[in-house]
Image: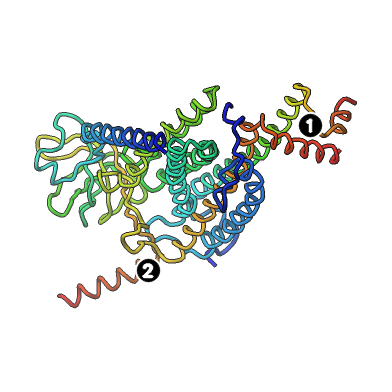
Amino acid sequence: MKARSKRLILVGGGVALLVAAVALVLSAFQQNLVFFHTPTEVYEGKAPTGRAFRIGGMVEDGSIRREADGLTVSFAITDTAKVIPVRYRGTLPDLFQEGKGAVVQGVLGPDGQFTATEVLAKHDENYMPVEAQYAIDQAHKASQTVQQ
Amino acid sequence: MQWESWSAFWQMGGAAPYVWGSYGVTLALIVAELVLVIRRRKDTVNRLLRWRRALGKDVGGSQARMESVE
Amino acid sequence: MTTLTRAPVRSPEGLLRFAAPQQFYPLAGRLAPWFAWAAALLTVVGLYIGFFVAPTDFQQGEVYRVIFIHVPAAWMSMFIYLVMAFWAAVGLVMNTRLSFIMSQALAPTGAMFCFVALWTGAVWGKPTWGTYWVWDARLTSQLLLLFLYFGFIALTRAIEDPRRADRAGAIIALVGAVNVPIIYFSVQWWNTLHQGASVSLTRAPSMASTMLAGMLIMAIAAWMYAIAVALWRVRALILERERHTEWVGEVLAAEAQTQGRAR
């Protein structure tokens, strides 16, 4: 029994040490684990300057505008607190829509205009039938009319 | 029923390559694993039988040994 | 295999006697087919619900049906690793041979599920996110899990001495287990492209009930499959490890006879 409990302490101690090591490594690399920054973080100067990074948030309602060449799109990314205007030339994913999540990669100009080289759609974790979404939209509209 | 026809089912609303690409690879891997895992025990049994015969131990199946010589 | 000369003379009572490989070998052989049939049946039911009862998703359309294998496979890949780590810890502390064999029997199945989760995720990501792969925390930590599985399998097979192989594997299993909660909570701890959990213990699932039913049934099917395959694999491993013993000699003799009869 003595040898057994000795082993238990050794194994337990070893695992605890390794957990601590991994935690340290993770906190050190915290910066690189951030896949995107929110618009608020960009305004607070937490986003890297002078190199490409990603901004994630919601595509602001009514902000998508296609330019005359048919390829360039401009829209705004928001986290409801701050808004960042984005310009992008290329194809958009099917799920890219106003009011839905998106992650854009590119560089921030000195004028606050973000020029994206890649646009990804970030969908949420909700799964429901088309009819259910339709019903929710109708209810939402009804409540808005009542408020007005 | 979700689908108007079988062809609509196979087309998956235009997502056929993604949906069937996922399910196809998964099915192939599961079949491969089942074949490997069942063959592994048979291979082990046969290998250990040869090993024990080589050691000159009686493995009981004298019939099997004689037939394999024939 | 020095331990074999001091094989236990006393036979422990109850379920604990199955901790002896000699007792566990026939038990595994009897149980495995039941789990395999349960897995097959549940898969048929789960896929029927997934493809014919569950409705089209409001934002993703039909492509979301990948979820019925993606999520169960991802859950299994994490859970199997934790079970491997559990058996590794039991083996190190109690010095029981069967514990290490169990964790080695689970590894290939865990790796398979891990690959399936990554593959289906990539194929699903293209039409929804617009990319097969990104280096966000969720995807990166899941890829690390696959490497841990490969490392475990490679190391336990590369080392000739079974006792040393057991210990080396157990250490990878225990160290790597730290990665599992990182995978699970990555979507909460960091900004990721991968969405948060649709199903968790702390709140109501954000899925339509038929979609959820299909996914949970497929998850149980994956459990049954993993148990069946691990039991079959553990039989081969036990025979290999215990080949010097009397009882394996008897098992082999019986096998030789059925082979002889089959011809």
Q: Relative to the observer, which residue lies in front, C111 or C263?
A: C263
* Label 1: how many Cα within 10 Å (few below 14, some 14–19, many 20+): many
Label pair 2/1, CB-CB below 8 angstroms? no
* Residue C233 appears in the rendering: no
Which chain is indicated by disc 2? A
The quarter of the rendered structure image containing the C terminus of chain C is: top right
Q: Which image quadrant for residue C88?
A: top left
Secondary structure type for disc 1: loop
Q: Residue furthest bottom?
A: A146
* C-alpha span from label 2 to label 1: 68 Å
Q: Position of residue A146 (x, y in %)?
A: 19, 78
Point out which mark residue B59 bears.
1
Q: Amino acid at mark 2?
A: Ala
The residue shown at (51%, 54%) is B12
Where is mark 2, residue-wise?
Answer: A132
Q: Is residue C230 left or right of residue A147?
A: right
At a point 80% along the width and 29% down the height, the residue shown is B58
Label 2, secondary structure: give it.
Answer: helix
The chain that hosts pointer 1 is B
Instruction: Indicate the quadrant where residue A105 lies.
Output: top left
Name the image colouring.
rainbow
User: Residue C143: x percent and y percent?
Assistant: 40, 36
Q: Amino acid at mark 1?
A: Val
**Which quadrant of the view contains residue A25?**
top left
Q: Position of residue A142 (x, y in %)?
A: 24, 75
Q: Nearer the viewer, residue A32 or A86?
A: A32
Left or right position of C252 against C149: right
Q: Residue at x 35, y 33 (%)?
A: A10
Q: Nearer the viewer, residue C162 or A103?
A: C162
Q: Is residue B12 visible?
A: yes
Q: Is residue A39 above or below residue A11?
A: below
Disc number for residue A46? none
